[in-house]
Amino acid sequence: SQDAMGTREDEVFLIVTADDFGMTPERDRGIIQAKKKGILTNTSLLVNGSTAREAVEEAKQCGLSVGLHLNLTEGPPISDAASVPSLLGVGPKWWPRRGEKAEPSSEELQFLGKEGIRQALKDGKLSMSEAAVEVRAQLEAFREMTGSFPTYIDGHQH
C-alpha cells in the first residue's frame, strides 16, 4: 500500500548529509566529490565559513541540496560584532578567506568555541537576545547566498 505522498510502506530512504560545507576549499571539494559519486544527498552550509559563497555555487552546479548549518561556536559572526558581544572573544584567525594565508599571530573577534559558549551559558553571561540576532543574521545570509530560506536547519557542535 501507499501513503498520501505515493510512497510505498516498505520503501526506505537514506538521507546522507555532510556538514561544514563552506568552511574550507578542501572540505568543499570532498563534499562535492561525494555528491558526484552518489554518496551524499544533502549538505549543511556554514554561512560564516571562508568559502560559503563559492560552495553554494558549486552545489548549484551539481544539484546538491543545501540546508543551514547554524553556528554559534566557531569562526566570526555574520552579524555586527557590536550586536552580539556575549557570543564573542578574541582568538586566532583559523578560517582564512580563499587565497589568503592564515598567519598564526593574526587574531579576530570570533565565537567562544563549544566549551566557551557552554561556560558562558552556565555562568549566565550569554545573551539569548544576542543569540537570536545571530540566528536571524545567519538565516538572512543563507537566503541571500542561495536565493531561498533553508528547507532544514541543523547545528554546528550543538
Image: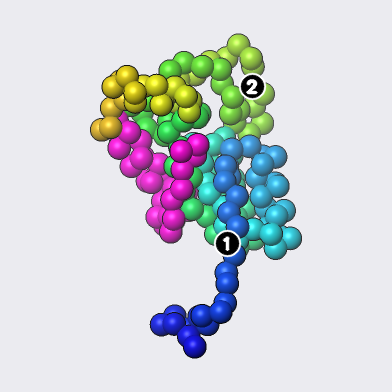
Q: Which residue is at a point 57% across and 42% down the rendered structure image?
A: 20
Q: Amino acid at mark 1?
A: Ile
Q: Residue at x 43, y 18 (%)?
A: 89
Q: Are marks 1 and 2 in contact (CB under 8 Å)?
A: no
Q: Is residue 131 magenta?
A: yes
Outermost residue toward the top?
Answer: 105
Left or right of residue 124: residue 107:
right
Q: Earlier in the sequence, mark 1 or mark 2?
A: 1
Residue 14 relative to residue 145: left or right: right
Left or right position of 8 against 132: right
Give the image location of residue 132, x and y in percent. Answer: 30, 37
Query: Which residue was labeled with disc 1?
Result: 15
Q: Is residue 154 visible?
A: yes
Would you identify the image quadrant in which residue 97 lies? Answer: top right
The magenta-colored residue range is: 130-158
Residue 83 visible, this orientation = no
Residue 115 versus residue 49 in the image, above or below: above
Residue 137: percent from the left, percent from the top? 36, 40
Q: Looking at the image, is 18 positioned above or below residue 81? A: below
In space, the residues marked 1 and 2 are separated at their CA atoms by 35 Å
Q: Is residue 84 magenta?
A: no
Amino acid carrying mark 2 in the image: Ala
Name the residue at 57% across, 46% down: 19
Label 1, residues with CA under 10 Å away: few <14, some 14-19, many ≥20: few
Q: Which residue is mark 2?
A: 102
User: Measured along the vertical axis of the image, is residue 123 above or below residue 59?
Assistant: above
Front-most of 17 and 91? 17
Helix, strand or loop at disc 1? loop
Q: Secondary structure at mark 2?
A: loop
